[in-house]
Amino acid sequence: MKIFKNIVILTGAGISAESGLATFRASNGLWNNHKVEDVATIEAFQKNPQYVHEFYNELKKELVKAKPNAAHLAITKLQNEYPADINIVTQNVDTLHEKAKSKNIYHVHGQINQAVCLNCGHILETFGDVDTETVCPNCQVAGMMKPNIVFFGENLLYMDKVDELLRSCDLFLSIGTSGVVFPAAAFVQTAKYYGALTYEFNLEPTSNNFYFDHHIMGKAGVTLPAFVDEMTASLKNGD
Ligand code: OAD
């Protein structure tokens, strides 16, 4: 295997499935049990903020308990042992990459342990409940905190940085994402256009699989550690 210098790893809900967290679009997934338009749009939040807060407070309780699995740990191993600039762009709002002690993590869809004040922009870090009464510790205004989750219709976070990373990477790995939510679904296209080798790790081929040079099918907790071993071995073998 070639030696890579700049690696971007895009992760989705599938990487956290083996940690016991529900994905979004599986038959028992979050979006099968809840309507996106009730809990994940800015209109829903404006109409019924308390309901939306309650949804994310409940989700937070689940996510807080979860532990990283072999796939998260394999990424940390790669970052520790492979001499490249390795960045993680995650669509996940859980903090399992952080718990696995990975670094260079960009939560483009936000993160569950944060709320953002719509009055002053302050980001509150909390694993406790946030509601319509919560006072912003920065501007002291009550009732303006929104879960720091990117709702449908909002811009993704860190996009300038992510775009720069996608244009300069020589290896792009996509792990456990269905590839149906844009713009993250188009990251592979950008990376490939600028010359990266692209891999998809999933249980099954996805709808945008056309842009992937390689498909590695199976549970990420199995396939990713094996792939990382192959990458680190290629350093020793000098191939
Ligand atoms: P999805 O639920 O759409 O897709 C999860 C993908 O993971 C599917 O393609 C599964 O086949 C795959 N998968 C499941 N278990 C796996 C495993 N053990 N190993 C490898 N792959 C596995 O989740 P996302 O693509 O992450 O947005 O969804 C994208 C966005 O849609 C989310 O970030 C969320 C949602 O609306 C926000 O919350 C802002």
Image (tube, grey):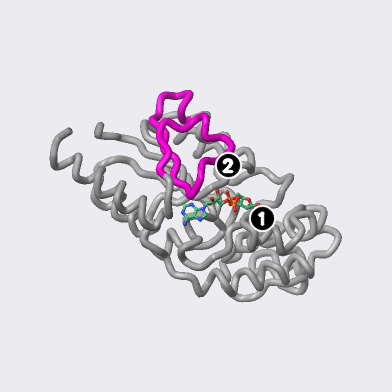
Separation of residues labelled 1 and 2 (CA atoms): 30 Å
Report if the beta carbon of the residue with label 2 is closer than 8 angstroms to ligand 1: yes
Is 10 one of the magenta-colored residues? no
Residue bearing mark 2: 179
Q: Position of residue 113 (x, y in %)?
A: 57, 66
At which x and y percent is residue 232? 22, 46
Q: Is residue 131 above or below residue 38?
A: below
Of circles 1 and 2, which is in front?
2
* Residue 80 coordinates in the image, percent (x, y): 27, 52
* Closest to the observer, 39 or 228: 228
Residue 158 point in image, percent of width and height = 55, 44
Up/down of 85 relative to 192, above or below = below
In magenta segment, residue 203: yes
| Disc marking residue 205 | none
Question: Which residue corresponds to the image point at 36% horizontal and 51% vertical from the top-left?
Answer: 223
Residue at the disc numbered 1: 121
Q: Along the polypeptide, which appears first: circle 1 or circle 2?
A: 1
On the picture, is 12 further left or further right than 79? right
Q: Residue at x 25, y 32 (%)?
A: 2
